[in-house]
Image (spheres, grey):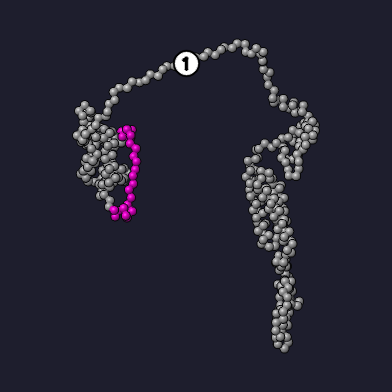
């Protein structure tokens, strides 16, 4: 098989220079399927190889321009149909989608260039969206009432026919059935047969009607509502609130700060850890027990006392040193708990721990003399 090259080799070894030749794509196509072996005397031995794959590549590279234009036109036409289908998804069915998919497969066999491949991918994506929507609505419409199917079955019973066209929905390029044809279809129906079928399910007992209405009517008695005049309330003499002076307020002896210090001293005297409930529970007074818990919470907040568990898992109080800034910098954190304490739990703790007396001395309730003595307690 002869081939063209940019230079020729003669027997005497001289090189007359390059010879110009036109760029022929068909020659490149042939060169892709030909393998040349050089022999010692300078001759070439060409061996023909199968080049079906090269022909396919060349076919795509040199596809006719009109064929590409026609292929893109058909793709754009299907894209327009797919766009219309996406705008009105309620009017689509699986048959139309299958036909569109077959047309796309036929066009894909002609695709040889990337531009047509992009159109094919875009069309396939739109068909996927349509199919996804149809799959989602398939289950919802499974139990829906089909009017067309109902009318078709009724027509078989009454020996008539029904209008075609999707239950009265207009198709493009097609007018509705005129009034004369609709009246002709209605006259062919056996309405008596349909009436007999419906009468079996709509029969009811005949009611009695009287010309003069009911036999006896009791007039409704109207109740008279007595309206009373609104009486304006008489207010007494306005009294101004009593103004308190500094000397009118007397501090009670069991003030919070004093009691917190007293509780801290008692813990310091004990030295070691002490069970929480044995320390705060007063078996003679529920209110004193609640106050003792309140005072201990201040010590825990300030870091002077820590709440921990012993080997048996019982809560105990331990005397500690308040944390420093360096301790917080090293990762020390404060934790808070909310404890529910009512009368039932109070009695159960006394019985469980066999508490006879409180470590914190019991306090007597302060009796206030009230406003009669002109003193207030806070």
Secondary element at tag 1: loop
Q: Which residue is mark 1?
A: 225
Front residue (pair 197, 208): 208
Instruction: Tell me where residue 373 appears, x and y as whole percent.
Output: 20, 28
Magenta stretch bounds: 325-347
Using the rendered image of the protein, determine whether residue 270 is visible from the camera's viewpoint.
no
Q: Is residue 304 above or below residue 368?
A: below
Image quadrant in which the N terminus is located: bottom right
Residue 209: image location, x then y, percent? 66, 15
Please tell me which residue is depicted at 65% across the width and 58% down the height of the picture: 118
- Foreground pick, 194 / 21: 21
Residue at image point 65% right, 47% down: 87
* Image quadrant assignment for residue 161: top right
x, y percent for residue 335: 33, 46
Asked if the magenta segment contains residue 344, the reply would be: yes
Please indicate, yes or no, whether residue 16 appears anywhere in the rendered image.
yes
- Residue at the (26%, 32%) spot, across then down: 285
- Residue occupying the point 74% across, 64% down: 64
Mark 1 burial class by Cα count in 10 Å: few <14, some 14-19, many 20+: few
Q: Is residue 61 above or below residue 357?
A: below
Determine whether, in the image, residue 313 is placed left or right of residue 15. Answer: left
Above or below, comparing residue 290 to residue 25 in the picture: above
Quadrant, the C terminus: top left
Q: Position of residue 354 (x, y in %)?
A: 27, 35
Q: Is residue 42 magenta?
A: no
149 sits left or right of 312 in the view: right
């Amino acid at each position: 098989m002869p081939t063209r090259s940019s230079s020729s080799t003669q027997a005497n070894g001289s090189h007359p220079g390059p010879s110009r030749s036109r760029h022929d794509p068909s020659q490149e196509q042939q060169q892709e399927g030909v393998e040349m072996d050089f022999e010692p005397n300078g001759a070439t031995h060409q061996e023909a190889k199968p080049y079906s794959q090269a022909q396919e590549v060349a076919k795509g590279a040199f596809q006719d321009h009109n064929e590409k234009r026609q292929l893109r036109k058909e793709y754009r036409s299907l894209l327009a149909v797919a766009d219309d289908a996406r705008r009105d998804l309620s009017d689509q069915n699986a048959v139309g989608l299958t036909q569109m998919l077959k047309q796309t497969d036929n066009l894909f066999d002609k695709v040889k260039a990337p531009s047509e491949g992009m159109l094919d991918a875009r069309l396939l994506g739109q068909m996927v969206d349509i199919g996804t929507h149809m799959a989602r609505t398939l289950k919802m419409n499974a139990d829906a009432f089909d009017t067309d199917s109902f009318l078709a079955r009724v027509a078989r019973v009454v020996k008539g026919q029904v209008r075609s066209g999707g239950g009265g929905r207009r198709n493009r390029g097609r007018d509705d059935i005129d009034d004369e044809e609709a009246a002709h279809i209605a006259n062919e129906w056996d309405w008596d047969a349909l009436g007999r079928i419906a009468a079996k399910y709509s029969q009811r007992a005949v009611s009695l009607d009287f010309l003069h209405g009911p036999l006896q009517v009791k007039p409704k008695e109207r109740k008279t509502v007595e309206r009373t005049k609104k009486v304006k309330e008489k207010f007494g003499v306005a009294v101004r609130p009593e103004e308190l002076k500094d000397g009118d307020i007397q501090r009670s002896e069991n003030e919070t700060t004093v009691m917190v210090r007293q509780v801290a001293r008692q813990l310091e005297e004990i030295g070691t850890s002490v069970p929480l409930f044995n320390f705060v529970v007063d078996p003679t007074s529920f209110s004193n027990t609640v106050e003792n818990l309140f005072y201990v919470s201040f010590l825990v907040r300030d870091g002077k006392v820590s709440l921990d568990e012993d080997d048996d898992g019982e809560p105990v109080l331990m005397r500690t040193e308040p944390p420093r800034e360096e301790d917080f910098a090293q990762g020390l954190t404060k934790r808070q708990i909310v404890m529910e304490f009512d009368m039932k739990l109070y009695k159960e703790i006394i019985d469980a721990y066999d508490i006879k007396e409180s470590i914190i001395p019991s306090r007597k309730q302060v009796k206030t003399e009230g406003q009669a003595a002109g003193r207030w307690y806070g």
